[in-house]
Image: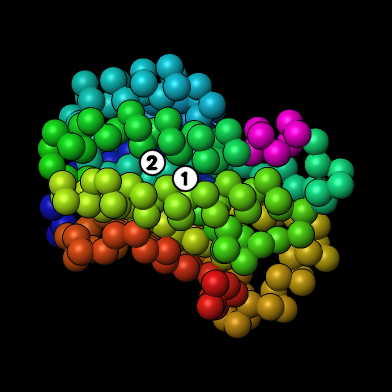
């Protein structure tokens, strides 16, 4: 059993976030999830938070701290896509994806940082995407936001690495969730053809990587980008 920690997973009411919350609970941690609607797995504390609103994130942390103690493991998972080709992409489609995926992560990690420093322990786990480093047509907004998380984790590692705090990125490939179900069938088949594993991934496979990064065995891993993509993005 790993040391029991207080874990926060953003966007833990469905998809990858829900699976990570389930796995963290099974690992013996105290788990809170943020949600805008619905709730996390049974046994987790669900708090309301909107990633584009720093005040709601602050209130969520205050509630978690009161009920479960200071957050020690932060999984920044909440994210959106608004796919369209560059020539059709509006500035709003670009900035709103950055605001949720990248600036939202900034808001969450910044709010968590004081507590992590005080406790001299922290695990920051950012859910990026294979598309961050591999690129994707129609995903200039999304891939920019996800590539930004790599610089984020590495700068955080350099700032806070000596204080018992690690920051790592998980780069999922094509994982079966609502997000990927929304992609056109032709695009899904195209991805499938280029995945060396010959299949799409499962949410539990991302949760396994997050569990490892939160656990005692990962104490000396920081600034890493861990692909969980069946080989799709290798070399990037
Ligand atoms: N699925 C994949 O193949 C894949 C691949 C690579 C990376 N990822 C990344 O993995 C993460 C989870 O993806 P998923 O497939 O599980 O997506 P999903 O099923 O669409 O779930 C997204 C989660 O993010 C939350 N969220 C979105 N915008 C938010 C906002 N402004 N404020 C608060 N919460 C917000 C959603 O809350 P609501 O339920 O309220 O909308 C939901 O809980 C995302 O960062 C995604 O980019 C996914």
Q: Position of residue 236 (x, y in %)?
A: 54, 72
Where on the picture, by quarter, is residue 189? bottom right
Observer-nearest of 235 and 36: 235
Q: Position of residue 119 (x, y in %)?
A: 13, 37
Evaluate if marks 2 and 1 touch, with contact meaning CB atoms under 8 Å apart.
yes
Q: Is residue 207 magenta?
A: no
Q: Residue drawn 50% across and 30% down?
A: 51
Residue farthest along the right direction in this orientation: 88
- Left or right: 103 as drawn, with respect to 5: right
The chief SS type of the magenta part is helix
Eyeballing the image, is 195 above or below 83?
below
Q: Residue drawn 55% across and 51% down?
A: 146
Which residue, given by chain and number where applicable, does mark 2 sit on?
9
Label 1 C-beta lies within 8 Å of the nearest ligand 1 atom: yes
Q: Could you tell me if residue 110 is visible in this image?
A: yes
Q: Residue drawn 81% across and 42% down?
A: 89
Q: Which mark is residue 233?
A: none
Q: Position of residue 172 (x, y in %)?
A: 52, 62
- Left or right: 138 as drawn, with respect to 226: right
Which element type, helix, strand or loop, lies under badge 2? strand
Bin the neighbour count of mark 1 within 10 Å (Cα to Cα): few under 14, some 14-19, many 20 and up.
many
Q: Could you tell me if residue 24 is visible in this image?
A: no
Q: Which mark is residue 77?
A: 1
Distance in Å between CA atoms under marks 2 and 1 = 7 Å
Q: Which residues are magenta?
A: 91-97
Q: Is residue 95 magenta?
A: yes
């Amino acid at each position: 059993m790993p040391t029991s920690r207080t874990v926060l997973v953003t966007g833990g009411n469905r998809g990858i976030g829900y699976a990570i919350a389930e796995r963290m609970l099974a690992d013996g941690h105290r788990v809170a999830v943020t949600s805008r609607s619905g709730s996390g797995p049974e046994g987790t504390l669900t708090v309301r938070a909107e990633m584009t609103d720093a005040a709601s994130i602050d209130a969520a942390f205050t509630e978690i701290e009161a009920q479960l103690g200071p957050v020690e493991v932060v999984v920044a998972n909440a994210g959106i896509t608004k796919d369209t080709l560059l020539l059709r992409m509006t500035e709003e489609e670009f900035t709103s994806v950055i605001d949720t995926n990248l600036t939202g992560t900034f808001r969450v990690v910044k709010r968590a940082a004081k507590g992590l420093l005080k406790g001299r322990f922290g695990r920051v786990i950012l859910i990026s995407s294979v598309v961050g480093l591999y690129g994707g047509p129609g995903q200039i907004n999304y891939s920019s936001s996800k590539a930004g998380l790599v610089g984020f984790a590495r700068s955080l590692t350099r700032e806070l690495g000596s204080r018992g705090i690690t920051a790592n990125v998980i780069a999922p490939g094509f994982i079966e969730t609502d997000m990927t179900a929304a992609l056109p069938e032709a695009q899904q088949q195209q991805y499938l053809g280029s995945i060396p594993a010959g299949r799409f991934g499962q949410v539990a496979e991302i949760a396994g990587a997050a569990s490892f990064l939160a656990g005692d065995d990962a104490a000396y891993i920081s600034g890493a980008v861990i692909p969980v993509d069946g080989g799709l993005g290798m070399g990037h």
